[in-house]
Image (cartoon, rainbow, N blue to C red):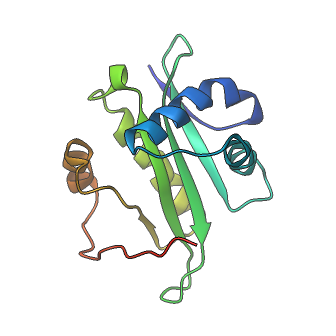
């Protein structure tokens, strides 16, 4: 049976190919410095963020998810932003994405968060089939200005 555990500092070698796969999927590039800082933040006890990794029974890393806990003006409880979710291509359609999302749900609930929310690209139709089963579409569109 697959396991889903919190990312720790010695997971970097297994995390990095999944992170790169995620960036490639979205045609994004990050500098080595940003990648280094990101992994440090994800595995630090002093940051309001973290991640989980699913491994096969043999220990092979199959998927990752990152989360960020943040305040809201609309609720007393914080929100939990599920920022990045990636399952290796050979492990897709095996319930790993759902396992990762549900692990974030458990974390957010244990921290008394009011909601878990995330974004996906409109072309990510395969993942949206899962999202439509386990969450609600908010109807909001994202606008942004890169600085």
Quadrant that contains the N terminus: top left
User: What percent of the width, then of the height, locates residue 32?
Assistant: 69, 40
Residue drawn 56% across and 69% down?
A: 112
Residue drawn 53% across and 89% down?
A: 73
Residue 138 or residue 32, whichever sits in front = 32
Q: Residue furthest right?
A: 46
User: What percent of the width, then of the height, locates residue 78?
Assistant: 57, 75
Quadrant that contains the C terminus: bottom right
User: What percent of the width, then of the height, locates residue 96?
Assistant: 38, 33
Residue drawn 21% across and 52% down?
A: 133
Residue drawn 75% across and 28% down?
A: 10
Q: State the image quarter where residue 144 is shown.
A: bottom left
Check the image and report above or below for 19 versus 123.
Answer: above
Q: Residue furthest top?
A: 58
Taking the image as shown, residue 20 lies to the left or right of residue 135, namely right
Taking the image as shown, residue 99 lies to the left or right of residue 95, namely right
């Amino acid at each position: 049976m697959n396991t889903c555990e919190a990312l720790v500092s010695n997971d970097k070698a297994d995390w990095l190919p999944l992170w790169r796969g995620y960036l490639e999927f979205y045609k994004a590039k990050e500098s080595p410095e940003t990648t280094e800082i990101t992994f440090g933040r994800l595995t630090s006890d002093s940051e309001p963020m973290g991640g989980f990794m699913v491994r096969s029974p043999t220990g092979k890393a199959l998927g990752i998810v990152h989360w960020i806990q943040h305040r809201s003006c609309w609720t007393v409880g914080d929100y939990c932003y599920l920022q990045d979710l990636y399952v290796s291509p050979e492990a897709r359609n095996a319930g790993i994405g759902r396992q990762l999302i549900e692990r974030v749900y458990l974390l957010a609930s244990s921290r008394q968060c009011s909601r878990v929310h995330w974004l996906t690209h409109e072309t990510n139709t395969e993942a949206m089939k899962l999202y439509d089963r386990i969450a609600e579409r908010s109807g909001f569109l994202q606008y942004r200005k890169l600085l």
